[in-house]
Image (cartoon, rainbow, N blue to C red):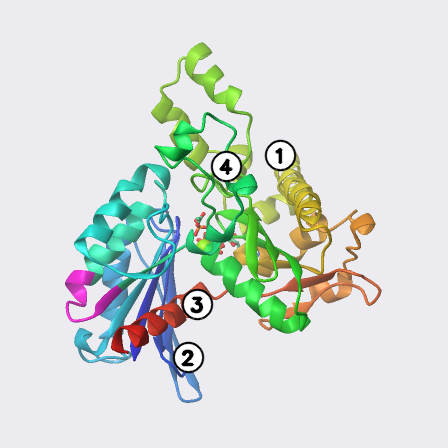
Amino acid sequence: MNIFVINSGSSSIKYQLIEMPSEKVVCSGIVERIGKEGAAITHKVFRGEKEKDKKLVMQISDHEEGLKEVVDLLTDDQIGVIKDPSEINVVGHRVVHGGESFAATTFITNEVKEEIKKLFPLASLHNPPNYLGIEVAEKLFPTAAQIAVFDTAFHQTLPPEAYRYAIPSKFYKEDRIRVYGFHGTSHKYVSEKAIEYLQKENSKIITIHLGNGCSMTAVKDGKSVDTSMGFGPMNGLIMGTRAGDIDQSVIFYLVNQLGYEAEDVKNMLNYNSGMIGLTGMNDMRDIIAKIESSDKEAILAYNMYAYRIRKYIGAYTAVLNGLDAIVYTGGVGENDSRMRELSASDLEYLGIHLDPYKNNLRSKAIREINTERSPVKILVIPTNEELEIASQCFSLMEKGKS
Ligand SMILES: Nc1ncnc2c1ncn2[C@@H]1O[C@H](COP(=O)(O)OP(=O)(O)O)[C@@H](O)[C@H]1O
Ligand SMILES: CC(=O)OP(=O)(O)O
Ligand SMILES: [Mg+2]
C-alpha cells in the first residue's frame, strides 16, 4: 500500500511516500522556510542502494504552492517515483488540533473537514495549513483515501487533574475548554521507542519535542499523563515564535491599558514572541551563530529557553514520582547538543547526569548521552511523525477491510 504522508508544520511541510507494511520509504522531503527568503525543497528518492537528492531553492509563498511543487517532483520524468497520482492509495495528513471530537485516526469526510475548520481559532498556525493540505491532496490524488491523524489524540489519556483548567466548570462542560496537548504523534513515537530501548515494563519518561513548536510530555507506562501545551499549541515551553507560559494578566494589560486589539495580542503571542521576539530570529541555527559572536540578547534568549525546559523536567519528575529517562527529539532536540547540555544541566539532584562527550557525537540512531553512573537515561531519539502516521493509516485501512 502506497501511503503519502503530509506533515504541515508552522514553517515547513515534511512529506514521505511510504510503502506499507514494509515501511520502505520511497521518497521523502521537506519544504523549508515557507514564506521567507531562501525557501527550499530538499527531495530525496531512495531506489535500491542509491539515494538521489534534489535541492531546489525557490520562492515559495505559502503551503499550497509548496505542496504543488512536491507533487510535480513525485511525477517528474527523471526523478519521479510514480507515473500517475492514482498510484497513491492513501494520503495521511497530520492534523494538529482534533479537539474532543477526534480521539483516534479517522477517514476524512466533509463532516470531518468541517470539524477541523471549526478548530481553526484554536490552532491558527496549524489547522489552516493542515486543512489546505487536505483540499490540495483531494484535488491532486482524487482516487486516494484521505486520512487524518491528530496531534491531540495521544493526550486523550490525560487525567482530569491535568486537563481541566480552574475556571468555572461551565466552560469545560459546555465549551470544551480544557488542555488538549499537541505533538502527540511525535511524543507517542519517541516514547514507544524509548520504552523498547529501556526494556522496562513500567516506565516513567519525559519526552521533550523541540522543533519550531516545542512541548514536553510526562509519559507513564506508555500513556501521556501531562503535557505542556494546552487548549491550543501556545502554552508551555519557549518556542520559535511563541511565548509559551505567560501570566494572563499581561494580556489584559496589553488590551486594557496599552490599547492593543485582542487579535494583535494573539498574533504577537503566536508569530512575534518566543525566540523571534527576543532575538529577531526563530531558527536556532541563526541564534547559535549569534551566540558565537557573543550577542547578549541571543545568549539570554537561549538561557531562557533552556531554563523553561529544566523547570518542566522538575515538574514532570514530580508528576511521575520518579524518572527513568528523558528523551530529546525534534529539529532542535536532535541536532543542538549545546541546548541539550544546558537544559539537562544542574539536575543531578534528580539523577540526571549528561556526558558531554557522548552528547557531542553525531548520529541519526537512537543514542544514550548520559554518563555511566546516571540513574536517569538521557536519550536522543529522532522523531518520525511520518512513519507513525503511515502506520496508523495502514491499521485503519486494514480494519476497514475486515
Ligand atoms: N543543527 C541544528 N542546530 C540547531 N538547531 C537546528 C539544527 N537543525 C535544525 N534545527 C532547528 O530545528 C527547528 C525546526 O525543527 P522541526 O522539528 O523541523 O520543526 P517544525 O516541525 O516545527 O517545522 C528550527 O528552529 C531549526 O533551527
Ligand atoms: C503543534 C505544533 O506546534 O507543531 P509544530 O511544531 O510543527 O509547529
Ligand atoms: Mg514539527
Mark 3 or mark 2, earlier in chain: 2
Mark 2 or mark 4, earlier in chain: 2
The residue at the point 39 percent across, 34 percent down is 173
Q: Amino acid at mark 1?
A: Glu
Residue receiving disc 1:
297
Question: On screen, 355 above or below 311?
Answer: below
Q: Is residue 127 left or right of residue 232?
A: left
Q: Residues within 10 Å of mark 3 (few under 14, many from 20)?
A: some
Residue receiving disc 3:
388
Which image quarter holds the N terminus? bottom left
Circle nearer the viewer, 4 or 1: 4
The answer to which quarter of the image holds residue 21 is: bottom left
Mark 3 or mark 4, earlier in chain: 4
- How far is disc 1 from disc 3 in space, using C-alphas? 38 Å
Circle nearer the viewer, 3 or 4: 4
Look at the numbered discs 3 and 2 and tell me whether their residues touch, using CB distance below 8 Å: no
Is residue 145 within the magenta segment? yes
Residue receiving disc 4:
164
Mark 4 or mark 1, earlier in chain: 4
Q: Is residue 384 left or right of residue 222?
A: left
- How far is disc 3 from disc 2 in space, using C-alphas? 10 Å
